[in-house]
Each structure stands twice: as C-alpha cells, then as structure tokens.
C-alpha cells in the first residue's frame, strides 16, 4: 500500500496505490489506484482525475486495476457516475466513495474509527487506541518512559504477547503489578514492533474503558482485538460470541487466573541501558533502574511532571495510617523475633494484626511494600515518604525513637570475641537480636528524615529533620568504640551532619581517643579483610561533598590520619583526604577557594597531615583518582566533577606556594618537593628551584642539608639514566639542579659515601647502558670511598659507616676485594665473628664470601689454620657457616672438634647447597637434630625424584619425634610434604606400614588437593576392621556425649576425621573402576557388625554412605549404582541414606553463575534427580524416595536463589 502523507501529496502521481490478494467490501481485490478530494464539486474533480489518469496511468495496467475515487463530502450522483465510467471499459472496475461510505467503512472498523476520532479531536466516549494511550501514558514523565524500559528483562513475555497479537485466539490474560502496568506492557510490546506489523495490529485493536463502549465495539462485524480496561466478568464471553479476541488486564489485587501470563518484574541491568538511552545521566541511571525494577509506577511518579495527579490508592488519608509503621521501619524480616517485636511496638498493636495490613497492601495494585521470602521492604522509600510522610505524628515519632535507639544503639556482641572468632560468632551463640534488614531500614529512614524532612509537613510540632538530629545525637553520645563500630555511620552523618561531626570530634580527644580502636583490623581471612574504621571514613567522605561541612570533616579525617597505625587495607584517612582535595578529580562540591580554605585550616591544626595531603595532590605520572562515598539523598555532589584546565593549574600553583612556605628548614619536606619536581608545570618547577637556591645551606642543620642533597642526587641520577624517556626532564634543567645539589654537599665524608653501599646505587652521572660496566664503575666508587675513609685515620670509621649504610655486606665485600685491610684482617675477623647483631653478621658474611670468591678456598683454609689458632670453637664454627656448603667446606668442618661441628650443623644455613651434596648434608643435619632443615633441603631440591626414599622417610619420622608439626618451624607446605610422601611411596623401596604411619601423622598438614593418603585409603577400602577402628577414634560411642577427652585423643580424632573426609575410593571398587556388588556387600556387612559392637552403627552408616556417594552411575544411567541401590533397600538405614545425600551435596564443589540467574541451575539439577527417581521407582522404591528428597532439596534451593536474586536487584545497597 502506498499512500503519500504530509508534503508528499504535492509531488504528483496517484494519491494511493493498494495491492491486496483479497479485498473486502471497500477495498478491491488485487491492484487498485485511489484519488481523493475535499472539493465542493466532486463530479468535476472526479472527471478530471479519471480522464487524466486514464490517459496516463503512470505504469499501472487499467485492464487489471480498479480506479477508486473518494470524496470527503456527500455526492448524491456518485452511483450514476460510477456506472457510466464502468461502461467505458477502460478499467477493470471503477468505484466512487463519498462521506456516507466513509462513515459506514469506519463503523465496520471500530479501532480505526477510534484512532481517527482522537486524531480529529473528537475522543469517543469510553474508548481509546493503543498509540494514543501509549503517547499519553509515557508522556506524563520527563523524560518520557520508553518501551525498552517498560519491557526491560521481559523478553519472553513480550514475545508471547506479540505472537498472540499476530494471530489472536479467543482471549489473552495478562497479570502485572497493576492493571495499569499490564496495559503499559501490552502497549509497549505493540509499539516495539516493526512499523508494518505495528500498524497492522493497531488497525484492529481498541481499548474499552466501560461496558457500554465494549458492547458498542463488540457489535462490529469485522473481527477485532478488544482490550478490557474495566471491571466485568461477562464482557469477554460476549466478545467471544461475536468472534472477537479479547485481552483481560489483571493487577496484584485481582484474583489469579490459571491461564494468565504473569508479567515478571523488570531486570535492573537491562533497565539501566534503557534509562541511559532515554538521556538520563549515568550517575542517576543505576538508581532509576533499580526503582523501575521495584516499581514501575513509583518510577513514573518520581519522573512525573505533575506527580500529584497519579497518586496510588494507598496514599489517600484513610489508608495511610496502616502503613506508617512500614514507612518508619523501611525494611525488616518477619523471621526475626526482634523485628516482629519492633513492628508491634512501633504500631502499638499485635504483630499478627499489623502484618495482615502489610499483606493486604503488598498484594494491592501498585504496592507500597514488597516481600521476598522473609524480607519486607518499602517499594520506594522516596515515593513512600513523599506520599505518606505528612501523616507521621508525634506519637509515631515517640515510638520510633524508642525502637531506633534500641535497635541501632546496641553494639555488635561479636566485638567482645577475639578477632579470629568473630566470623563464626553465631555458632558460639552470639546471634543478633535484630536482622540486618531492620538496621538498614532504620538507617535509611534517618537519612530520609534528616535530608528531606524540612520539605515534608507533619502533623506534630517536631520537624522530621529535627527529630533525626535528636536521634543521631543520642546514638552517638557514648564514646565506646564498639558502638561506633556497630553503627551505620554513613547514614547518621547524612541524617544529621553537625551532630555527627560534634560527636566525632569529642571521641577523638585525649591521649587515647576511643575511636583509635576502630583501626583494629579483623584477623587474617582466606580472601577478605575488614576494619570498622572504613565506615567512619566513608561517613566523613560523604560530608566532605558539602561545602558547609568540608573543613570540619577534613579536620576530623586529619585527626584520624594522625592516629592511624596503618594496616593492610587501602582505605586510610590520608587516602580519603587526598581524594577530597585532588585538584583534577576533587571529591567535594566545594569551590576551589573553599577547598584551599579547608587546606589552610588543616595546615594550622594538623600541619604534618596537611603536608602529606598537599604532596599527594601534586601532579604524578599515571595518577589515579577514586570516587569517594556519596550522599544517598542530599544534593551535595555535582553530577560529574569536571575541572577546567585553568582551575587545575591555579590549584597546583596554590599548593606549591603553600608547600614552599611550610617546607622551611625541613630537609624531609624539601625532599618530598624535589621528588615532585619532574611532574610540576614548568613555572612551578622553577619556583621550587629558585626557593631551594635561596636557602642558606650553612644555616641548615647538617642532617637536613644531607637529606636535600640525597633527594637531588637521586632525581638527577634517575633523569640522566633515562634521558630519552618521555617523562625525563630536559638536560638543561637537570644540569641546573646539579648546581643546586652542590650547595648542599655533606661535610661529613661518611654521609657522602654511605649510600654507595646499597642495592643499585644511583650515581650522579646516571646508569651505564652496559650493566656490567655500571657494576664495575660502582665497585670502583665503593673501593675508592673506603680508601678515602681509611686515609682519614678515624679509628671508628668502619663502625660509623656500617651504622649508616643500607647494605653492610657490600662494605665487607668491598674491603675483601681491595685488600686494603690485610694487615688487620685477622683481628677484624676475630672481632666480628663474635658479634651477634645483624649489621656485624652481614658485614663479616660479605667479607668472607667475597674473600673466598676472589682468593680461592685456600684463603679460608689458611685463615682457619693460622688466625683460627686463637679463635674459640664458636668463632671457628661461625666462620665455617659463612662459607658456601661445598666438598671443601665440609672437609674443613670435619677437621674441627666435635663441639665445633655440633655448633656448625646447628647454625649453618642450608639454602644454597650443591645438589650432589644433598644427601650427605641431610645425613649430618639428621645426626645433629635438624630434621626441619633437612626437609627444607628436600623441598628446594630441583630433582626430588632422585632423592633417597629412605632418607626422606627418616627425616619425616625424626620430625615427628620432635613432636612439632608447626608449619612455621618446618616451613613446608602441605603440597611439599605430600610430594615427599609420594616419592617414598612410588619408589617401592620403603615398607608400606612406615609410609602409612607417616600419612596418619601428617594428615593435618597435608594438602588434600595435591596429595591423598593412598595407603590409608587403600586400607580403609580393603579392611572393614581398620574402618571401624578409625570410626571409633573419631566418634564417641552412642550415649557417651558427656565424657571428656584428652588433648591427645582430640588430636587423633581430628586426624581420623581428615582421613574419613578425604576417602573417595569405596570398598568393592575394582581395578577397572567398577563396583563389585558382592565384594561391597561383604565389606558393608562386616563393617556394620563391628560398628554395632562398638556402639557406633549410626555414625558408621553415615560414613559408609558418604564414601559410596561418588559418581557411580548404574547401567541404566541413573544414580546411584545398582549395588548401592540394593544396599539402600536392604539396610533401610536413614543414616546410610543421609551419608549418601551429604556426600553428594559436598561433592558439588565450587561453581560460578550469573548472580541474577536465580535458581535456574538448581531447577535443572532437580529435573535430573526427578528423572533418576522415575527410572528406579518400580524396582528400588526406597531409593526413589531418597532421590525425590534430593529433588525437593534442589527445588527449595532454587526458590532461595530466586529470592536472593530478587533481593540483590531490589536492594542494591
């Protein structure tokens, strides 16, 4: 069909061309060409068009086409004209329609009639069309709600709707949050169709808003789709009788229908993309997407240009009172007794009565409450407060005050436990009285009252914001750190900023401020660590967004930075301050001038912290800025802090000026500024240098001048070493800095050279490209420095140098290399071999190591023979321990007395032993009682397989004799111990009982993922007696729960448990990995007899079930194996089946999935076990019942996962 519109009608040609295989009463079959007019003289226009088109049909074949003329006016002679033209035979057929025909045509097509009426401004009573409804509904908001948003995450439902609309049956029922939302989803589904399909459906779809319109529309002879937007139980049947299709819209308040399509809730992730496409800023899109998921109607009210015109039923005065308790609590769990009590108290009514009201409103259209599992929460706090806040009375606030102080005011009792026990506090009986949900709900309520309270009129004398300030003041009055560690500080800060800051300032006074305890980090955890101080930092970061509270919050952060002991976490007060004041990415809404005022306040009150903050804010290569915590409801944070270049440059200039003023005569501070020089803008770089040049080095304390000199030396060296790098300073600037450096050259020679004896010392001329040449140059400088120091004839030069040098060993190596102290070498060795401080030991180790390397081992032998004559046994052994462990060194040790050898072997470091000597050294270590060192040698050996198995076993056995399996002592991982046991086992050269004893002894230390105690497992599978013995070790006999056990018995029980828990090779398993039914049955029968005798049958059955729970499938493909099924039927033991099920669940291991997938995975597993049960039910009925219990477990788990996914999307905070 081609019908030009708008300006296209002026382009000439046919007014319309229509091609249809089969027409109707008004549209001819096949091809028809159309001409339209509104002229008063219809006949003249008809004649003119007919003759013109007959003469030039513009590519149309008149013999196969129908000419149609249409006038919007009445034309009495149209039939005569039509017949006369037909007789001419020029066209296949000729037709003429006037206003009466058009009216009749519209009557036969009610949906088009409605559409056209609305288009002409004559809205038909009780009817509407989809396109108009969608335009009105979506256009209420700014920006207009889009179809992709309404349909976000609802793809399956949309496809179902679109499929039905394309070929409608008798009726379609949609059930959403409200009838209005159901209609919006239907409309959006149609509007999302491609244009041709959309037009086709719109042309036969109409909305009826009352029964009279429905009846009028249903009278049409043409089949249409009627949408029922009113109450009626009979309307659909009436439409169906006339052959029409109908859509029934339901909301939550309507009774469910078995055939209804349930409209799922919007998915936040998809909604966020749709919101962004609507033109919403990225910072707001996430929150709006979550609100859309929780309630599309609430989102519509939030974005509405006139929200008051779309208020829900629950917001009218007579309904509001029953919702005030929910409004004030915000969130709660109906499975928490404490929460239920709080609800009763705040409502001044029984929980069951209050809950009835909540259930009523939760099931109403456009519900103000949601319930997922046991979790209840407001659909939208903002929406609820804007509509219900005006009904909050003083009486409500009085009851709320009591609850908020009771729930939030008590500290977390886990904090009374040792740090390493807090994570399992609930197992120790420390269960919170109230749920985490109600804590969060009350905190959010305080924020809403404090942040938005002034704009919400109340029926009481106390404003909501004043009430929030009062409650926050009361909550923060105690200075107990445990209370601060338990409170939602971010919420309290946003609710009442002044009260919060006043309390924080008070709690940071004195020599031992209470808040210092907040820095106490949790004990090391496998993956994550935490510390209560982070909540306080985030609270202060939120306040720093406000220009009113910036300075005060920064001062509190500075006080915290001063007392911060440091820790593993990156969240530190200093980092928070840096983020707030970072010139290119400030985390505050304050102006540049206000930020500088705040920094000046820090300089005055906390100068050391202020210095660190300003230095951190200077430009850096590859600097990173992190967004800080933002307020939830207060409008403090700008949309996106963008800093103009001019503002950034001015900020750096202001910081540099302040840093220079504060540097004064502090060498360390000048060193910080010098380190920042390369990144500073050229003008600021020059300002810093000129101020450095202006310093009078003679008036500076020597230590301060030396610090400046070192900072300049390192900077110059670095930029000369990498002069071609993009970041390197120009040569002229580097050379100019060398002139500055010379002014601060230390007068003390040791100060000038001590740095040479460090790792990779930075020479002033920079590094040589050839690293060997550079090392040679460094060695020459070191040697020259030592010669110069010796020439000073200062008797204490060496000790002074060693005290200052970073690497004493390099001093020793240089002295040995130069040979400049040969005349005092023997006395030096004798003196330093008796010292036990780290500096002395490192120095003499460097000396002996280098001397042996450069002069050969003969030097060491001669020293021991000549100088060693006067040495004590301890000095001789100490000398030998500093030699590399070689054949020559060991021979030298063997020449010493037994006493000296004993000292040597107990002290020698065996990390670097030549591998051919490993076994010889290990023998000595074992002889002198150092199995731990022997095991370390084995662990570091690159060719472990070549080690003597008996030697490995002896070392492991001797370690046990020391009765110390402490990992800190033997310093071997469970993987390494297992590797040594595997070598001994695989060799076949060690008796299996010896290895089995070691497996038993080392069970607590072994890593079960890398090594399994194979011999013990094999014995368990072969020998039911051994299995029964292990069960008896692990578990008490029935009825003996009160008997105390010794530490040794508890240790044995722990090992036995580890063994049973790691056992995966069941009895009856053949070499072909198949279960033998008869062998399995014999083993189980014997084991159960023994277990019964020892009064441990129940726990033994559980263990047998667990080991048989592995993935042994039957010949029919079902789990478990037929042999296990036979045991289930024969034993009829609940404990055996419990073990099977527990083992099955434990074998799942770790898996990953989309957190928003809900229980899809679990439902798939449930289907699998349902299929297994169906397969085995006739032959193994008890097994089938167990499989159905497994199915039910996974279905319940699936529902839990569904709820978690819902809560995760709804409660993103």
Image (cartoon, grey):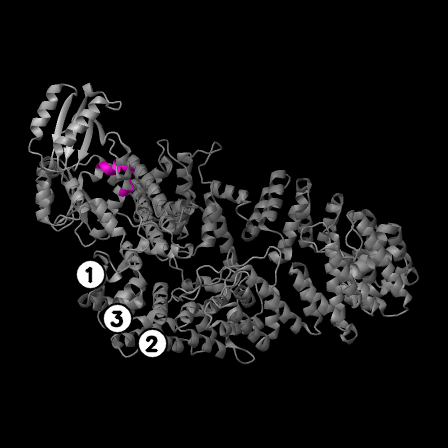
Question: Pointer 2: residues within 10 angstroms few (<14), some, or many (20+)?
Answer: many
Q: Residue 805's quadrant in the figure?
A: bottom right
Q: Is residue 131 left or right of residue 631?
A: left
Secondary structure under badge 3?
helix
Question: Pointer 1: residues within 10 angstroms few (<14), some, or many (20+)?
Answer: some
What residue do we see at 61% from left, 48% from top? 976
Q: CA distance from mark 2 to mark 3?
A: 14 Å
Q: Choose the circle earlier in sequence order: 2 or 3.
A: 3
- Write down the region rendered in magenta: 191-200
Q: What numbered label is drawn on residue 313?
A: 1
What residue do we see at 43% from left, 60% from top? 639
In the rendered image, the quadrant that contains the C terminus is: bottom left
Q: What numbered label is drawn on residue 1176?
A: none
Q: Is residue 958 left or right of residue 1202?
A: right
Q: Is residue 82 left or right of residue 1205?
A: left
Instruction: Say which residue label 2 marks.
Output: 467
Secondary structure under badge 2?
helix
Looking at the image, do the residues carrying marks 2 and 3 touch, with CB atoms under 8 Å apart? Answer: no
Q: CA distance from mark 1 to mark 2?
A: 28 Å
Q: Choose the circle earlier in sequence order: 1 or 2.
A: 1
């Amino acid at each position: 069909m081609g019908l030009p519109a708008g300006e296209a009608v002026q382009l000439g040609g046919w007014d319309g061309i229509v091609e249809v295989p089969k027409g109707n009463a008004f549209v001819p079959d096949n091809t028809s060409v159309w001409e339209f007019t509104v002229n008063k003289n219809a006949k003249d226009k008809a004649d003119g068009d007919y003759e013109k088109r007959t003469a030039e049909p513009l590519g149309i074949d008149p013999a196969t086409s129908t000419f149609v003329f249409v006038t919007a006016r009445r034309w009495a002679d149209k039939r005569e004209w039509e017949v006369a033209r037909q007789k001419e035979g020029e066209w296949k057929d000729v037709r003429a329609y006037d206003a009466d025909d058009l009216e009749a045509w519209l009557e036969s097509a009610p949906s088009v009639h409605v559409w056209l009426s609305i288009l002409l401004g004559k809205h038909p009573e009780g009817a509407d069309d989809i396109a108009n409804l969608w335009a009105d509904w979506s256009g209420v908001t700014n920006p207009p709600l889009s179809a992709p948003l309404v349909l976000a995450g609802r793809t399956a439902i949309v496809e179902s709707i679109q499929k039905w609309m394309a070929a409608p049956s008798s009726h379609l029922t949609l059930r959403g949050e409200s009838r209005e939302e159901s209609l919006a989803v239907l409309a959006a589904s149609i509007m999302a169709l491609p244009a041709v399909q959309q037009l086709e459906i719109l042309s036969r779809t109409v909305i009826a808003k009352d029964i009279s319109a429905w009846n009028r529309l249903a009278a049409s002879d043409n089949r249409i789709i009627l949408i029922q937007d009113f109450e009626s139980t009979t309307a659909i049947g009436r439409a169906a009788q006339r052959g029409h299709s109908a859509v029934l819209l339901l909301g939550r308040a309507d009774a469910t229908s078995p055939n209804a399509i349930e409209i799922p809730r919007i998915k936040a992730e998809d909604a966020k993309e749709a919101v962004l496409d609507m033109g919403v800023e990225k910072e707001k899109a996430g929150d709006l997407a979550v609100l859309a998921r929780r309630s599309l109607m609430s989102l519509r009210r939030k974005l509405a240009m006139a929200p008051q015109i779309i208020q829900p039923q629950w917001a009218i005065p007579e309904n509001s009172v029953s919702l005030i308790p929910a409004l004030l609590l915000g969130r709660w769990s109906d499975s928490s007794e404490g929460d239920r009590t709080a609800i009763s108290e705040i409502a001044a009514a029984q929980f069951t009565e209050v809950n009835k009201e909540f259930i009523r409103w939760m099931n109403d259209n456009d519900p103000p409450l949601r319930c997922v599992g046991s979790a209840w929460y407001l659909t939208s706090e903002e929406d609820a407060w804007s509509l219900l806040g005006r009904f909050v009375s003083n009486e409500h606030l009085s009851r709320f005050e009591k609850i908020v102080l009771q729930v939030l005011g008590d500290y977390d009792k886990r904090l009374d436990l040792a740090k390493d026990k807090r994570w399992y506090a609930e197992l120790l009986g420390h269960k919170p009285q109230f749920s985490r949900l109600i804590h969060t709900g009350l905190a959010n309520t305080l924020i809403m009252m404090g942040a938005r309270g002034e704009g919400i009129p109340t029926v009481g004398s106390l404003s909501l914001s004043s009430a929030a300030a009062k409650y926050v003041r009361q909550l923060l009055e105690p200075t107990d750190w445990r209370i601060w560690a338990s409170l939602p500080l971010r919420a309290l800060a946003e609710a009442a900023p002044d009260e919060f800051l006043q309390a924080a300032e008070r709690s940071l006074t004195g020599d031992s401020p209470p808040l210092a305890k907040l820095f106490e980090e949790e004990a090391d955890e496998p993956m994550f660590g935490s510390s209560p101080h982070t909540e306080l930092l985030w609270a202060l970061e939120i306040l720093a967004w406000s220009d009113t509270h910036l300075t005060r919050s920064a001062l509190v952060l500075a006080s915290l930075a001063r007392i911060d002991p440091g820790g593993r976490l990156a969240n530190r007060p200093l980092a928070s301050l840096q983020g707030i004041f970072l010139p290119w990415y400030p985390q505050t809404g304050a102006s540049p001038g206000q930020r500088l005022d705040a920094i000046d306040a820090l300089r005055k009150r906390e100068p050391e912290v202020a210095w660190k903050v300003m230095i951190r804010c200077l430009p850096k290569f590859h600097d990173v800025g992190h967004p800080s915590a933002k307020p939830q409801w207060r409008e403090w944070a700008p949309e996106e802090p963008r800093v103009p270049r001019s503002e950034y440059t001015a900020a750096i200039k202001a910081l540099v000026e302040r840093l220079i003023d504060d540097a004064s005569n502090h060498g360390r501070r000048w060193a910080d500024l010098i380190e920042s020089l390369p990144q500073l803008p050229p003008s600021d770089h020059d300002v810093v240098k000129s101020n450095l040049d202006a310093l009078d080095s003679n008036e500076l304390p020597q230590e301060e001048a030396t610090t400046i000199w070192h900072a300049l030396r390192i900077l110059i060296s670095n930029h000369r070493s990498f002069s071609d790098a993009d970041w390197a300073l120009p040569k002229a600037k580097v050379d100019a800095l060398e002139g500055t450096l010379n002014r601060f050259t230390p007068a003390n020679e040791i100060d000038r050279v001590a740095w040479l004896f460090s790792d990779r010392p930075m020479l002033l001329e920079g590094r040589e490209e050839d690293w060997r040449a550079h090392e040679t140059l460094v060695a020459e400088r070191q040697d020259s420095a030592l010669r110069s120091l010796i020439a000073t004839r200062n008797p204490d030069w060496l000790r002074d140098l060693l005290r200052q040098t970073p690497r004493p060993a390099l001093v020793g190596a240089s002295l040995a290399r130069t040979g400049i102290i040969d005349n005092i070498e023997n006395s030096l060795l004798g003196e330093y071999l008796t010292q036990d401080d780290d500096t002395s030991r490192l120095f003499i180790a460097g000396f002996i190591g280098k001397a042996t390397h450069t002069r050969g081992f003969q030097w060491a032998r001669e020293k021991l023979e000549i100088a060693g004559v006067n040495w004590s046994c301890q000095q001789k052994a100490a000398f030998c321990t500093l030699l590399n462990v070689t054949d020559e060194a060991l021979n030298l040790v063997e020449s010493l007395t037994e006493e000296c050898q004993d000292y040597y072997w107990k002290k020698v470091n065996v990390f670097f032993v030549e591998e051919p000597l490993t076994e010889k050294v290990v023998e000595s270590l074992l002889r002198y009682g150092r199995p731990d060192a022997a095991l370390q040698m084995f662990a570091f050996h690159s060719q472990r397989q070549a080690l003597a198995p008996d030697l490995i076993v002896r070392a492991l056995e001797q370690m046990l004799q020391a009765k110390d399996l402490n990992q800190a002592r033997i310093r071997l991982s469970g993987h390494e111990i297992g590797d040594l046991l595997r070598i001994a086992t695989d060799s076949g050269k060690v008796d299996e009982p010896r290895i089995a004893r070691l497996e038993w002894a080392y069970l607590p230390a072994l890593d079960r993922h890398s090594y399994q105690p194979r011999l013990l497992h094999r014995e368990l599978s072969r020998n039911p007696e051994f299995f029964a013995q292990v069960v008896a070790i692990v578990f008490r006999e029935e009825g003996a729960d009160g008997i105390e056990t010794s530490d040794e018995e508890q240790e044995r029980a722990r090992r036995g448990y580890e063994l049973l828990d790691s056992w995966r090779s069941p009895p009856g398993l053949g070499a072909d990995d198949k279960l033998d039914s008869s062998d399995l049955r014999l083993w189980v029968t014997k084991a159960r007899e023994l277990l019964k005798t020892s009064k441990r049958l129940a726990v033994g059955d559980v263990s047998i079930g667990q080991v048989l729970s592995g993935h042994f499938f039957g010949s029919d493909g079902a789990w478990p194996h037929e042999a296990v099924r036979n045991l289930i039927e024969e034993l009829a033991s609940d404990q055996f089946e419990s073990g099977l099920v527990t083992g099955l669940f434990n074998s799942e291991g770790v898996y990953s999935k989309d957190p928003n997938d809900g229980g899809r995975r679990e439902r798939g597993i449930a289907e699998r076990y349902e299929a297994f049960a169906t397969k085995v039910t006739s032959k193994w009925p008890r097994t089938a019942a167990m499989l159905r219990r497994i199915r039910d477990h996974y279905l319940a788990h699936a529902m839990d996962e569904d709820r978690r996914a819902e809560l995760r999307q709804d409660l993103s905070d």
